[in-house]
Image (tube, helix red, strand yellow):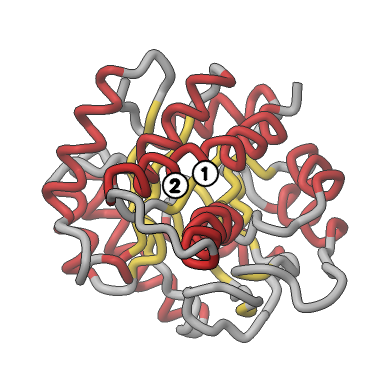
Amino acid sequence: MLVNTNEILKHAQQEKYAVAAFNVYNLETVQAAIRAAEQENQPVIIALGERYFPTVDVEGFSALVKALAEKSHVPVALHLDHAYEKESIIRAIRCGFTSVMFDGSAYDLTENIRRTKEIVEIAHMAGVSVEAEIGSLAKGEFSDEEEGDGTLTDPQSAKEFVDATGIDFLAAAIGTVHGLYKGEPNIDLQLLEEIQQAVDVPLVLHGGSGTPDAIVKQTIELGICKVNVNTEVSMAAVSYLQNCFEKKQMPHLSTVMAEMQHTMEPIMAKFVRLLANK
């Protein structure tokens, strides 16, 4: 069933678990994410980044996800990840996304508030929930995200931002990275606790790939309700392709796509289980 993302995250906040938000790019990644969630009987968030708009037809993609969600027995949300342009957000809202992320982290706090508030007003009129971010994640290895400066989220700025914009959930920068860590993770759990105490909305952890399981569980106890996962899933699928090339195989494309999906599903299921915090 297709549901509003905020509905999923409010329940997660109340029950102290988190929901996996998988970055997807095609039919196989969507099917893998939903099947992993069904296997664990947990909700899931299907996330499409604005950076994939040139290669993914957004309206067709939305129709695909909605059709698969309606067949599923678990709650499925459709989320626009890391959008920088108002036009992209409006396009996603019009074709049925249940939440959008406006990333104004490159702006100073005042300008980020101004731009985010405008997006919130537009999205809420359509019943769509909004994620936003202050602070910025650095770019690790094997990531296709934009380079961030690694600025951590200031708790008082977070409170001002949430109060002024009316966002539904907040991405907190606490030391995770997009991609895989280049050294030992340096994640500030004390800062996360301070952010949790400063705001009352569900918190989002970007950079789930490579973050130690024990730390992920601690972040859930400190208010994280949504964890974004991209790189580990991508690497599993690409590793399968590399093995095909190394063996000089030439399987049919339908076989390649099916096997890639089968390769991704256990990686996704691992994250769904971890975040369920059972």
Instruction: Evaluate if marks 2 and 1 touch, with contact meaning CB atoms under 8 Å apart.
Output: yes
Residue 162 in view of the camera: no
Q: Please give the label number shown on residue 264.
A: 1
> Is 178 left, or right, of 73 in this rendering?
right
Q: Badge 2 is on which residue? A: 260
Image-based side of 128 in relation to 224, left or right: left
Viewer-nearest of labels 2 and 1? 2
Other-residue count near label 2 (Cα within 10 Å), few / some / many at <14 / 14–19 / ≥20: many
- Work out whether 96 lies above or below 232: above
> Disc 2 residue type?
Met
Residue sticking out furthest to the top: 73
Q: Where's residue 73, x and y in %? A: 39, 13
Q: CA gap, disc 2 to disc 1?
A: 6 Å
Q: Is residue 57 visible?
A: yes
Observer-nearest of 56 and 198: 56
Q: Residue at x 71, y 42 (%)?
A: 223
